[in-house]
Each structure stands twice: as C-alpha cells, then as structure tokens.
Amino acid sequence: MTLDPKPQRATPRKKSPANLLLLMPGIAVMGGLSIGALWLVEQLQFLRCPAGTFLAGSGRLASLFQAIPIFMASIGFGFLIVNWLTYAVRPVRRFFDREAKRYGEPGYHASQRGLLKFSAAVLAAMLPIILTASLSQFCLADDAILYQREPWSGLKRYAWGDVSRIETSCTHGSRGGQDSTYILVMRDGAQISLMEWPRGFARAYPQMRRALAGGAFSFDQSAVRPYCSSPFADLLRTRP
C-alpha cells in the first residue's frame, strides 16, 4: 500500500451567486431598521427630559456609540426580513430552493434559524452599549437646559441665561462632504453639541431662538467657511 504524502485539502464550497440578489434589499432593510431604532432611542431620551422639552439628543461621540451598534445589530435582522419576504413569493422561493440544492447550501428554515441565533447574539451584545451611550444626552426645554456629559454623571440643570457663547462651524468633512456643528458653551465650560441630526435641530431652532432671546451670549461663526453650502448655512452664520 502506498500513502499519498500530500494531505488532501477540502475543496471550499462555492456560494450561490443568487445570494447577491438579496444584498441590496438587505442593506435597504438594515437602513430602515437603523433609522427606526435611532428614533426609539430619541423617544427614550425624551422620556428622561422635563415637560416642555423641544429637542433631545446626544453629542457626536455618544451618537456614534449608538448608531454603529444599532447598524451592526440590524444586519442579521435585515436579512431575516428579506429572506422571509423572498420566501413568501412562490416563484422566487422555488428559484432560491433550487439554487440552495445545487450548491449544497442550507435550506430556508435552517438559514433562518442560524440568522436568528446570530441576530439575537449580536443584539444582546450591542444593546447595553446603545442604552449606556443614550444616557449621555441633553434636553432643551422652554425654561431650562439639562445636560449629562457622561452616562454616570446625572442630568445637570442650566438656565438659558447660563449660555455664554455659541460656536458654529461648517468645514470639509473627512469623506468629502461638509461637516457642520452648532455648540452651546455654558458658563462652567460645558459644551453641548446640538447638530448631530441637522433636520431635527432645524425644526427646533425657532423655539431655541425664543428661549435665548435677551441672553448675554457671544456668537462665533468664524469657523463657517465661505464655501459652506449646507442647507442650514443661514442658521450657522446668524446669531439667534
């Protein structure tokens, strides 16, 4: 008997190219789930704010620690939903069943069970990060500003008269777009970034302007570049 000195390597199993057809719908569903989850986080933050709050949210770093885990948690659930919708259409279901048999891939039910376990595990890991980051927030109310810089520090109450300066900027972003900021600087040095979600800020701007009326604060828009073409450029350049 002769032995083959070279060990045999398992041939990698090919994946069906038909799976690529589900990629774009999956990404679209992930985006929808992420937007919905971010809206729920915002509603949770409003619950921690007093009556009369017209804007609640988090600064840039805390917003990233919410958005990135939310998107990661949406991946498995996005494909679960796309697979379910696909399987509900008989001709499409038959097509993907044939492809699964042809390439030796798991069937629909086995794939869904695997995706569900993966999704639940990722969600269990991401949820504590999302909820902890959401505690770092601000509340703009008619008669006060509440701000919690760290998740463990507790909400600190300010009067609108405690705003000493407003700083705005509009510069080139890291990915070629434009990066805008609108920051309330309080008398104790705390800085509250309000423009992580620009459209929500723009809707709340008239109420903020009324709350600031008569306040003795300076306005610094020197970091708003002449080329700024943001749809909110006027808000960035004009003292409220």
Image (spheres, helix red, strand yellow):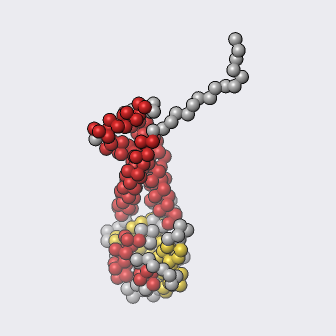
Image label count: 0
Residue 29 on image: x %, y %:
37, 52
- Specify the quadrant of the image occupied by residue 47: bottom left
Whether residue 210 is visible, yes or no, is: yes
Which residue is painted at 33% across and 42% down in the image? 86
Q: Quadrant of the N terminus?
A: top right
Work out whether residue 226 or residue 42 is closer to the camera in this orientation and state it. Answer: 226
Give the side of residue 91 with respect to residue 127, left or right: left
Camera-side residue: 157 or 217? 217
Q: Going 36% across and 34% down the picture, which residue do you hit?
A: 97
Residue drawn at x 52%, y 33% is 13
The front one of 200 and 193 is 200
Q: Is residue 82 left or right of residue 1?
A: left
Q: Is residue 120 visible?
A: no
Point 50% across, 81% down: residue: 227
Image: 10 above or below 144: above
Q: 78 or 134, which is in the foreground?
A: 78
Image location (x, y in percent) of residue 204 = 35, 74
Q: Relative to 125, say whether 100 is above or below.
A: above
Q: Quadrant of residue 89?
A: top left
Name, please, the residue furthest toward the top.
1
Whole-percent x, y for residue 213 in the image: 38, 85
Q: Quadrant of the C terminus?
A: bottom left
Residue 53, position as x, y percentages in the image: 34, 70
